[in-house]
Image: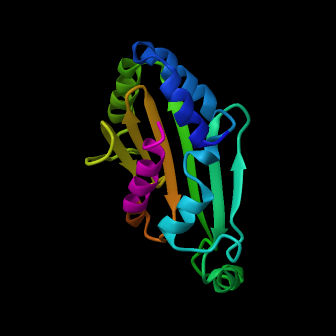
Amino acid sequence: MSCAQDSSKESEINPADAALWAKYKLESWKNHGCELVTDAELEKLFQFNGKETTLNARTLPNQAFCLRTWHKPDWKERETNNEKDGNNWLNPQNRVVVHLLDYTSEEQARMQMNNLRRDRRSTYEEDVTGIGEEAVWSTGTVTLLVRKGQYVINVCVEISDVAHENLDKAKAVAALAMRKL
């Protein structure tokens, strides 16, 4: 299923049936998580050629989930470094995960975000503005959670070796996915 098909279906649904449309859209993303942010969009955002860098995508069944990995430009040097005793381990791959969660209502999604702030503040230590209705960032897990209505987009980005430097790219990835909701 392509996003163009989703758009054509949207015009067929009466706006009064917004809850039905929201359910249809989430159901349509199950097993299509890699369409929330496409290979082409990722290649453009991070400025790489997927064929040259061995871009790989993995999904989870019956979920709106996508894990993508590709080699860093200096991946061979990193692997050589990692084989030497006493050197800091350097990840030879870039990683982007996009996972769409549906809390069935805006109130439930808001409560989940509040619970994260209350119970897991040491993990999700930073509130992020300028994206979605609310968002939190975890430097330790390089994960951004963005709420839009009843949905929460979980975006994990590991591009930079400096964890917090991944936040801006995570925001850009989340923005791409949110446009399709």
Percent coordinates x, y for residue 55 in the rendering: 68, 66
Residue 23: which quarter of the image? top right
Name the residue at 51% across, 52% down.
Answer: 156
Which SS does the magenta portion mostly show? helix
Magenta-drawn stretch contains 101: no
Left or right, 105 with respect to 62, comes to left
Q: Position of residue 139 (x, y in %)?
A: 41, 55
- The tally of labels here is 0
Instruction: Locate residue 124, reporting x and y percent.
Output: 38, 44
Left or right: residue 90 compared with residue 148: right
Residue 139 visible somewhere in the drawing: no
Residue 24 in which image quadrant: top right
Q: Which residues are magenta?
A: 167-181
Q: Residue 84's spot in the image, x, y percent?
A: 69, 84
The coloring applied to the image is rainbow
In this rendering, the answer to whether 131 lies above or below 113 is: below
